[in-house]
Image: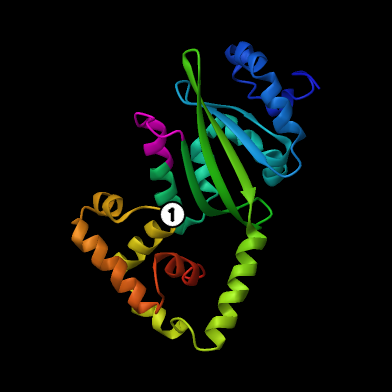
Amino acid sequence: MNLVEIKDCLNPHGLCEKILSTKIYKTLEVCERSENLMVFIYLIEKDNFLYCNRNLKRIFGKFYKRLWNDGWDFWLSRIDEREAAIIGDRIRNFMTGPHREKTLNSHYHITNFEEDKIYLEHEIFLHRTNDQTIALNYLIDISDKERIENSLDHINNSKGHGAPKKELGGISAREQEVLRLIANGYSSKEIANMLFISNHTAISHRKNLIEKFRVRNTAHLVKTAAAFI
């Protein structure tokens, strides 16, 4: 396998990145040979996508080329509308920050062009090479895992555990915002900053949600509320 063989996976507009592609050829080769992992590479300073592997191409079919033209706007447009704003802000803050952290982990739903919903685990790993920062994006389809866990939650609810569906409507718009942020891994302090509320208020919202869903802790809160989120 060589660069010519995977040229369809490389951004045709990134001709100036040919030298970089050659340097990381071994990395691209491993990405192409992966059976299950979806991968795309983003160049932070250049603000463009360099590469996506064959597994990711299958998700979007011929539309994968919109990654080259529309960048992150295209990717975010495929995320569930209830999650897109939060995930978009999280990715942008991570990319434009001082890069103290090398990894960012998120979970969210996307829709392909056959209208199939897919639940993804998305890890962004930053690697510095010469004068460029490469953002390696690893994606795993965990839709089956979500279905299994939801089926277990259904069993629990049928036995009277957890908040019944009829009570979920009692959650305010603000609590829904807090719930989605909790589900995406934000701490109370981060939630307070994002929603322009005090840390005490953010903690109170978290405690109230735990009580409303009748669960023991935050982990159980997110799991029980998965369908609602």
Residue assigned mark 1: 184
Question: For the magenta stretch, what is the residue range?
Answer: 91-102
Q: Amino acid at mark 1?
A: Asn
Q: Which residue is nearer to you in this view: 175 or 160?
A: 160
Q: Nearer the viewer, residue 114 or 86?
A: 86
Which of 71 and 129 lies nearest the eye of the viewer?
129
User: Where is residue 2, by image quadrant?
Assistant: top right
Task: Report the label total.
Answer: 1
Residue 55 inside the magenta-drawn segment? no
Residue 226 % position (x, y): 50, 67
> In x, y percent, where is residue 207?
29, 70
Which residue is depicted at the point 38% across and 44% down? 89
Q: Nearer the viewer, residue 6 or 64?
A: 6
Q: Residue at x 55, y 88 (%)?
A: 159
- Judge whether residue 96 is colored magenta: yes
Q: How is the image coloured?
A: rainbow
Above or below residue 84? Residue 72 is above
Q: Against 46, is 153 above or below?
A: below
Q: Where 99 sits versus 222, above or below?
A: above
